[in-house]
């Protein structure tokens, strides 16, 4: 089978028709007879004709493409978000272009630049852990590119945003540990500049305050790259384990930090939950089969992707400028398992 594509001009030459006639026949124009339409479409199908999307976008003023920026697609949460994005985008006739920052600000800037050079119609982005300067996104927003933030957001750009209820997730997880008899609860988290870190810490802090517990400064550990480097998680754990008054439980706040912390504690021979309980934010499907099974805060990743895409498409397809925006907060769900079994 021949997979080499042909052009409208090739079809016109082969059938001894004008380029205009072929173009109209392929678009099912009323100006062209049914006999000619059938002739053109049969030939196009037999010779693997495919419309040129770039040419179409130039003609129509859009590319029917959405750019996506995430930290890494190996993260179960972001994989679920992307599935949600695709489920809405494809149904609306839009393609998606996925890029990964690997928590690098420089890569985020390059990816956004690459996507805009591809003439995307809109951008869905979750900020990297290194991102402090939003100039690259502010410029695009000022130029009128529709942008929607999800998960890791910013208050510096006025647009739609979709997040999980991070405060409640952090609060519920900490409250669960407190109810199980744990009092010395440490917190391993991402850098403080990203929104999810601040929101989840606020929930943790609120639960501890309600229990009348003062949090020692040395119980809070920030991983500069969100745990992308296993060494930064290992360093945080080792520092906690060397404390004179070491914690009896840990709340972790991302897929990578959570699952890696469980792995490292097992590797160190720490009995879970007898010596150290652990609960964290993770969407891994393996939480039930890990050793021990992992208590976790589940985020609605698929739904987040769907909602963010719906909001972006509303911006893209709007006939008038949009001045009112919303921050959509989706509920989290705490699933308790053996890693936080109550103290005897």
Image: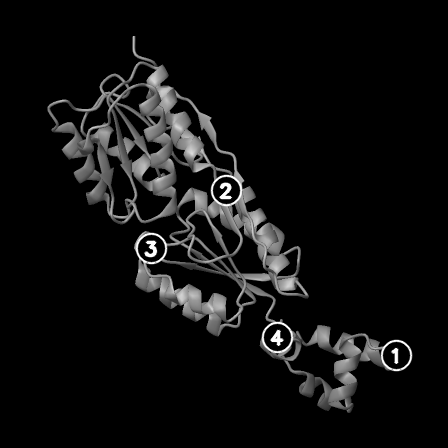
Given residues 206 and 79, the one toward you in this image is 206
Residue 144 lies left or right of residue 283; in this view the side is right
Q: Label 2: which residue? A: 301
Location of residue 243 in the rendering, given as x and y in whole percent from the top left corner: 12, 27
Depth check, front residue: 112 or 159: 159
**Mark 2 → mark 1, Cα distance in angstroms:** 50 Å
Which circle, 2 or 1, is nearer the viewer?
A: 2
- The reply to whether residue 286 is visible in this rendering is no
Location of the C terminus (image quadrant)? top left
**Whether residue 216 is visible:** yes
Determine which of the numbered discs, if any, sits on residue 57 in the image.
Answer: 4
Quadrant location of residue 110? bottom left
Q: What whole-number distance in Å separates the C-alpha atoms at marks 4 and 2? A: 31 Å
Is the residue 289 above or below the residue 301 in the image? above
Mark 2, Cα crowd under 10 Å, few <14 / some 14-19 / many 20+, is many
- C-alpha span from label 4 to label 1: 29 Å
CA separation in Å, label 1 and label 3: 55 Å
Q: Is 5 located above or below residue 90 in the figure?
A: below
Q: What residue sits 54% from the left and 48% below the top? A: 305
Closer to the observer: label 4 or label 1? 4
Q: Residues within 10 Å of mark 1 (few under 14, many from 20)?
A: few
The tag earlier along the polypeptide, 2 or 1, is 1
Sooner in the amino-acid sequence: mark 1 or mark 3: 1
Q: Which residue is mark 3?
A: 102
Q: Secondary structure at mark 4?
A: helix
* Callout 2 secondary element: helix
């Amino acid at each position: 089978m021949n997979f080499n594509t042909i052009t409208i001009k090739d079809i016109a030459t082969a059938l001894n028709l004008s380029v205009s006639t072929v173009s109209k026949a392929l678009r099912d124009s009323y100006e062209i007879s049914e006999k000619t339409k059938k002739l053109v479409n049969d030939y196009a199908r037999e010779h693997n004709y495919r419309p040129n999307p770039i040419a179409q976008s130039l003609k129509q003023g859009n590319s029917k493409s959405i750019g996506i920026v995430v930290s890494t697609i190996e993260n179960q949460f972001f994989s679920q978000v992307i599935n949600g994005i695709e489920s809405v985008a494809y149904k609306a006739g839009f393609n998606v272009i996925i890029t990964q920052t690997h928590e690098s600000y420089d890569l985020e800037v390059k990816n956004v630049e690459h996507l805009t050079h591809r003439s995307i119609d809109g951008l869905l982005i979750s900020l990297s852990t290194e991102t402090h300067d939003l100039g690259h996104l502010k410029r695009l927003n000022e130029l009128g590119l529709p942008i929607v933030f999800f998960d890791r957001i910013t208050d510096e750009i006025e647009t739609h945003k979709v997040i999980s209820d991070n405060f409640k997730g952090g609060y519920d997880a900490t409250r669960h540990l407190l109810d199980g008899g744990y009092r010395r609860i440490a917190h391993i988290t991402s850098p403080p500049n990203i929104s999810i870190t601040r929101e989840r810490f606020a929930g943790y802090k609120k639960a501890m305050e309600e229990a009348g517990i003062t949090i020692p400064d040395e119980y809070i550990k920030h991983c500069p790259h969100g745990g992308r480097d296993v060494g930064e998680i290992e360093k945080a754990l080792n520092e906690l384990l060397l404390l004179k008054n070491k914690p009896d439980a840990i709340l972790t706040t991302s897929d990578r930090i959570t699952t890696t912390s469980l792995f490292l504690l097992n590797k160190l021979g720490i009995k879970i939950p007898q010596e150290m309980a652990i609960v964290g934010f993770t969407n891994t499907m393996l939480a039930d089969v890990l050793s021990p099974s992992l208590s976790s805060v589940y985020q609605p990743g698929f739904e987040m992707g769907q909602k963010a895409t719906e909001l972006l498409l509303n911006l893209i397809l709007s006939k008038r400028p949009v001045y009112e925006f919303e921050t959509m907060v989706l509920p989290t769900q705490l699933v308790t398992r053996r890693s936080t079994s109550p103290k005897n």
